[in-house]
Each structure stands twice: as C-alpha cells, then as structure tokens.
Amino acid sequence: MVAARITVNGKETPIAPATPHTTVLDFLRERGLTGTKEGCAEGECGACSVLVARPGVDKPTDWVAVNACLVPVAALDGQEVVTSEGLATPGAPGTPPTLHPVQEEMAVRGGSQCGYCTPGFICSMAAEYYRPGRCAHPEPAAGADAEHGPNGFDLHALSGNLCRCTGYRPIRDAAYAVGAPAGDDPLAQRREQSPPAPAATEYTLDDSAFLRPGTLAETLRLLRDRPDAVVVAGSTDWGVEVNIRARRAECVVAVDRLPELRELRVEPDSIVIGAAQTLTEIERRLDGTVPLLAELFPQFASRLIRNSATLGGNLGTGSPIGDSPPVLLALEASVLLADADGEREVPLADYFTGYRQSVRRPGELIRAVRVPLPLSPVTAFHKIAKRRFDDISSVAVAFALDIEDGTVRKARIGLGGVAATPIRALAAEAALEGRPWTAETAEAAAGILRAQGTPMDDHRASAEYRSAMLGQSLLKLYAQTTEAVSS
C-alpha cells in the first residue's frame, strides 16, 4: 500500500503524521497555510473553503469548493487541493505575486474588511469562476437576475460563505465583475485533464483507521467484518460530530469514490441515482429532468455542502428534518440496499422505522436510489425555515400530483419535521384522490393535512405553527397551479 499523500498547491506532501481524524483544515494550517480559517467547524460559514479537483460534469475535471473543516485529510489521499494562497501566481524573487482575477476584483471593489472570511469567499468564487458554461463579459448571460450576474456568475456559489463586517454588495460586485479565464490560466487548462484516480487507502495511526476500499465488493466484505465501522461519503454529517462532539471511531470507511455508487442511469421505467453522487453532480447531470429535485437542490443547505453531501448520506443519517426524504417520498422512490450476501430494494415509505432508525441492517449499504417513471406533472417543494437559504427546515412538504380533466388522479405528499421520521401524508393523499381539483377540495384536504404527524415544540417552531404550515402549503400549491392554468 502506497503511503497516503496529498497534493497542495502543486506540491505533494505526505499525510502522516496527521491522525485519521485530522481535518483538511487543521492539516493545512499546521503546514503554514493559514488563509484557510475555522469559523464554525460545522460547514456553516465557509471560512475554510478550498478547491479540490473532482471528476467533471462537462469537462474531465471540475474545480469544486468544499468545507475543509469537515473533510478528513485522509479522504483526499492522492487528490489535488488548491488553497487561497495557491491561486496567486508567484512573482520573481523579491517581487510580490500576481493576484488571481478573483482576488484582484475583491481587492479593488472593497470586498474585504477584517479579511477573516475573505480566503473562503475567494475559493468559492474561484470554483464558480472556473465552472464550465459560465459566460463572461461582454455578452450578458441569458436569464440574468438578482442571483445571476451578467457574466453568468451564480451567487448560490457563495451561499455557504458568511461575512460579518464587509457586507455582501461589494462581494457581489466583485463576483459579477470577473471575466473568463485567460487561455494560459493553469487552473483553467487543468480542467482538460482527468483528476487523479481514487486511491485505495489504508491509513492507520494510534489505533484508528481510515479505509477506502477499491471496489464495492471489497467494501461490503469489510462492513460485514467490521459492522461497527462508520461509513462516510461527503462527511458533512460525520465531520460535525468529530468537530463539535469530539466523536472518534476506530474505523472509518469511505465510499464516496466507489464507481458502483456513482452511477446516474435513466432507464425506461426509472432513474437510478448512485448513493455517492454529490447533490451538485446530480443537479447538473439531471439538468431539470426531475423538476421536484430541481426545486429541492437550491434549498438544500449551501453550494459548499451540496458539493460534498450525497443522497445516500442524507438518507443514511435517518434525520426527520433531512430535506431530501420528503421529496423522495413524494416521488415514490425506493432505496437499493447492498451487503456481502446480495441486494434488496425497499420502498422509501417503508425504510424509516424510528428516530434516526431504518430497516438497514448492520453491514448493509445504500447503493442507489430509484425514482420511478413517469413523473407526476404537478410538483412542488415547500421548505419553511427562518432563513431563505442555508438553513435547517422547521417543516418541509413535497407534493406530486397527477391531475387529469380537473380531477386529482393520484396524490403523493412527503413531510419532514413533523414526526420522528419523514412520513407520507396518507390521509391527505386519500382526501385528494378522485376529487376535483377545486378550492373546496384543497381546503378540505388542507384541514386533514394539518393533523398529520406528531409535530413538537422546539427552538425552530412550535407544534401549532408546524401544523398550520402543512395546511398552508397545500393551499399555496392550489393557488400556484390555478395561477399557472389561468395565465
């Protein structure tokens, strides 16, 4: 087994003597790359953002911004990382480096005051700067709006970065001012080459191990022999446990690069989404093919989190307030579960059994999610939270309706945040099916929907508020659909 190594700003360095639980953030800072900052240690602020070379959607390589505070450095064995320090071009001896175009625009437009958050903004902005398909001056991008600049810059790229003192206008101005990468830009040229192949990793130190098997079969045998192992993909959940709760595991098994978990296949009767595809990859590969998922993605955490988080991880945690389960329940999705003895398919409606519990057995892994076709034509995802983006939902409601000749032929409603598990609103579905899609039907079903689940009072919302929002969501859906028909 080759010693674990990582390439940082073009220089290869061994990961040892870092422990298997050491984050990329701590690894970089211990080596003097202090532009990478810790603000929250849970993926909320983006001060730790760095660039990683990942398999591309439109080119062989994409430069992807991730939260260095959440990713174990061992997870990047064999991979390439660029920090804010690595973006500038070194000058001749005795002369300062030449700023990267993103750094230059942030400087001249006053995008930094105290500077603590600035390197993270720079890295997130650089990832969007290099995104294939982003147009540049002087031709304005089609559909430019408040969240998309004339240069095609998508402000959602910065949704995971917080600034406490500068204010966002000058940062937005800098983002909207960057042009296209120059022809000789080395990071732009790097996109034309494939990223490093995933390294099979066996990194052990101080009685703890980080393991990345090379195949799914090897992974399943390992999980059979080590049912106590913690399985990670994007590490957006486990990284918080390590940082905030000081959790440690004797064995961590990474599945994020397994080819068998990274497929996305459109079949005649279903769409199969690999459990280790990141949400950003799914979003860009589906490109609106599943409108309900397309509505979910911008509301799921931040771009930084979506660049690492996976559907398999979101379902694996079993959280009752995860954003994807209500949507997948409305889509009548199923999960493909694999272990060393074989594979089985379980409807998502039967998957959750209790608070953070499921039918998944020890040694079993979520391999993929299957979404049946055809899709219902009337869909909506309503996330009620205190912030518009990058927040945990108080209530999440997903709708998928078939309406023919003014009658609801089929209704599927997924709910999150109102019970110990994500649930289907079966009674409300029954109140809609076979009835005309009218204000009276919507009102009656909304009253039933308000009584679904067992909502509780907590710091995000009261039980009464959650119940009220369930009914209001259905009335909102009715208003939206009738507006669309009348227009």
Image: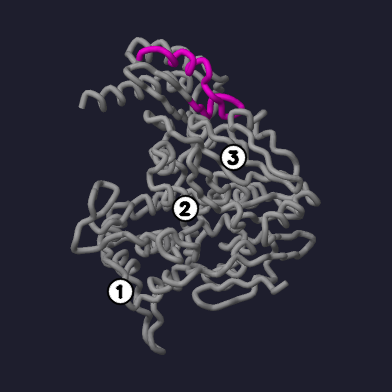
What's the distance in space between the residues labelled 3 and 2, CA to CA? 17 Å
153 is higher (above) or lower (below) than 291: below
Q: Nearer the viewer, residue 46 or 375?
A: 375
Tag 2 residue: 281
Q: Are marks 1 and 3 in contact (CB under 8 Å)?
A: no
Extent of the magenta region? 413-436
The amino acid type found where label 2 is placed reads: Glu
Residue at 72 percent across and 65 percent down: it is 202
> Residue 182: which numbered mark, if any?
1
- Quarter of image, res 26: bottom right
Indicate which label's residue lies in the foreground, 3 or 2. 2
What's the distance in space between the residues labelled 1 and 3, CA to CA? 41 Å
Image coordinates of residue 379 in percent, x first then y, are 39, 30
Can residue 44 be seen here? no
SS label for mark 1: loop
- Residue 88 falls left or right of residue 225: left
423 is within the stretch colored magenta: yes
